[in-house]
Each structure stands twice: as structure tokens, then as C-alpha cells.
Image (cartoon, helix red, strand yellow):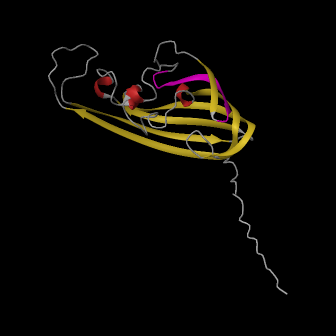
Amino acid sequence: MRRLLMILLLAPGPVLAAPESWALHGQATIIEQYHPAFRSAYRGPNSLDPGSRGDETVTAALYGGMRPWDGGEAWADGEIDQGFGLSDTLGVAGFTNGEGSKVGRAEPYFRLHRLFFRQTFSLGGDGVDIASAPNQLGAMRSADDLVVTLGKFFATDIFDTNQYAHDPSQDFLNWAIMDAGAFDYAADAWGYSYGGTGEWTVDDWSFRAGLFDMSRIPNGT
């Protein structure tokens, strides 16, 4: 008599990490730019300084977030800024330093740029692993969902995002290729505003809508 021995090996399924309950992220960016002197036949108050000139911008940011309950996230981002763009950020249409769009000062100053709350409602679908990142707690969530965001943040945190040219502190510096150069939006001089958005995602498409507060003076403080 023959006996057949069968051994079944069961590989363990993927271990789903518990949703991240809190996170701190930091980032510092130093940009130094210089141009030699050049001939300028015409010059106005908004022209690039034709003299030999160098300027720098320095930013240091801290991103702090917590999860008060399932699907909820609260974030506060503080930033210290210092420095100037070339010629006080004048004279170039596609400006060479996107960080120079902020209000320039010789001394460092602090701003609370983001203070917002986000709630994600699961609508089903496959599980998607969301990596931990600034302003995003790591978690496993459904592919189909509804996300509501309220508070102070960038309109471009939600709209017109581009993974290659979105943030001059991490990507290309040129102002014209931060998101879309022709896209303007409600914001102060640093690019932030108060408002709310809704994002509805199903399969491979999403619908987004938002309402933001305009500054009294365009790009004012």
C-alpha cells in the first residue's frame, strides 16, 4: 500500500499596520541664487537689478498631526522664513525661486501656515496603503472614499497637484512650473487661505470642489 503525504504550506497574509495615531515631520530648505552684472538698456521699478547680486531664502517647517478618531486627522504646520528673492522677487516673469514668493525679511519670522482638519469616509473598494508624509498620517483605507477638509491650507494641496513640480522646497524652483503657471487662486502672500473642500473618489476618477476666502488685498498679508 502506498501512502501519499501532502504538505500544504500556507503563507501568512499581509500584515496591516495599525493607522498612524500621530506624526511629526520637519524640513529645512536653503536656496542661494546669484547673477553677475549685465547691461540693461531699459530699467523700471519692477525690473531685475542689473548689478552683480546674490540673495538667499531660508525656510524651516515643522508639521504636526494627530488622529482624534477613526478617519479623522488634525494638522498644524508652523514655518520660520527669512531672506529675499533676487531683486525682491521682481524682474522675471517665471521667477527663479518659488520660495521667494513669500514676504521677504532680513530677520527670521514665524507663521502658522496650516491649521486644518480632514475627515475620510470609506465608501468601499480595495484597500489602499497610504504612506506617512507631511500632512498625511499613514493608514490603510478604501480606494473609494469621500474626504472633507476644513481650515487654513493651500488650495493647491487639493487642486492642480503635480508630483514633479508642486513644491519649490522639494521640486523645481521656477515659479512658472509650480503646479500650473497660469493657475491663480485665493491666497495670502504665502499662498494660504481659509476654506473647505470635498473630494469624492470612485475607482480611477475623482470629483473635487472647494470654497476659499479671498484676501482683502491680492497676495497681501
Q: Which residue is most to the front?
A: 1
- Total numbered labels: 0
From the viewer's perspective, tell me whether residue 144 is left or right of residue 182. Answer: right
Of residues 179 and 9, the one nearer the viewer is 9
From the viewer's perspective, tell me whether residue 18 is left or right of residue 49. Answer: right
Identity of the residue drawn at 45% across and 22% down: 189
Of residues 115 and 73, the one nearer the viewer is 73
> Does 191 appear in magenta?
yes
From the viewer's perspective, tell me whether residue 36 is left or right of residue 96. Answer: left
Residue 106 seen anywhere in this rendered image of the structure: no
Of residues 217 and 178, the one nearer the viewer is 178
Of residues 92 and 153, the one nearer the viewer is 92
Identity of the residue drawn at 54% across and 45% down: 25
Q: Position of residue 193 (x, y in %)?
A: 55, 22
Q: Position of residue 91 (x, y in %)?
A: 28, 20
Q: Which residues are magenta?
A: 188-203
Which quarter of the rendering shows the N terminus? Answer: bottom right
Residue 64 figure quarter: top right
Q: Which residue is most to the right?
A: 1
From the viewer's perspective, tell me whether residue 49 is left or right of residue 185. Answer: left
Q: Main secondary structure of the magenta part?
A: strand
Q: Position of residue 28 (x, y in %)?
A: 43, 42
Residue 213 seen anywhere in this rendered image of the structure: yes
Q: Position of residue 213 (x, y in %)?
A: 58, 17
- 73 relative to 182, above or below: below
Residue 168 figure quarter: top left
